């Protein structure tokens, strides 16, 4: 299924505007960090696209890059306190 870049950008923008803490560890996210920083913002799919999840805002959560990469394609992020 092709993904819409415009739709994904809107989802990412909505998550940024929310200023949410990381869905996995609960710590604040510095939304100004460069994408290469492990503590930078990543948009995570709560139910991964590879497992049938939808590419929607309702299925998207704000996470640190490191937390999202650790979650991988698991369905739910383990809550890890940093």
Image (cartoon, rainbow, N blue to C red):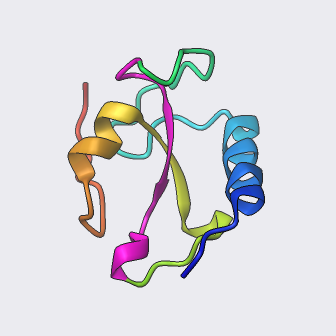
How many marks the image carries: the answer is 0
The image position of residue 68, as x and y in percent, is: 34, 44
Instruction: Verify whether residue 46 appears in magenta.
Output: yes
- Name the residue at 39% across, 34% down: 65
Depth order, front residue of 36/63: 36
Q: Position of residue 69 (x, y in %)?
A: 28, 43
Determine whether 5 is above or below 81 in the image: below
Question: Is 60 colored magenta in this rendering?
Answer: no
Outermost residue on the front side: it is: 2
Q: Residue at 40% of width from left, 17% of height from top?
A: 37
The quarter of the rendered structure image containing the C terminus is: top left
| Residue 62 picture location, percent across and down | 53, 44
Dividing the image into 4 quarters, which one contains the N terminus? bottom right
Looking at the rendering, the stretch of residues picked out in magenta corresponds to 37-51
Question: Residue drawn at (75%, 47%), measured in percent from left and top?
Answer: 14
Q: Quadrant of residue 72?
A: bottom left
Q: Is residue 55 left or right of residue 46?
A: right
- Judge from the rendering whether residue 70 lies leftward or rightward of residue 42; answer left or right: left
Q: Quadrant of residue 64?
A: top left
Above or below, comparing residue 59 to residue 65 in the picture:
below
Q: Is 72 positioned to the left or the right of 37 in the image? A: left
Quarter of the figure with residue 27: top left
């Amino acid at each position: 299924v092709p993904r819409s870049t415009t739709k994904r950008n809107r989802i990412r923008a909505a998550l940024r505007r929310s200023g949410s803490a990381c869905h996995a560890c609960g710590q604040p996210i510095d939304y100004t960090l460069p994408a290469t920083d492990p503590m930078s913002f990543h948009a995570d799919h709560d139910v991964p696209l590879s497992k049938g999840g939808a590419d929607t805002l309702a299925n998207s959560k704000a996470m640190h890059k490191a937390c999202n990469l650790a979650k991988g394609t698991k369905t739910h992020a383990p809550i890890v306190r940093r």
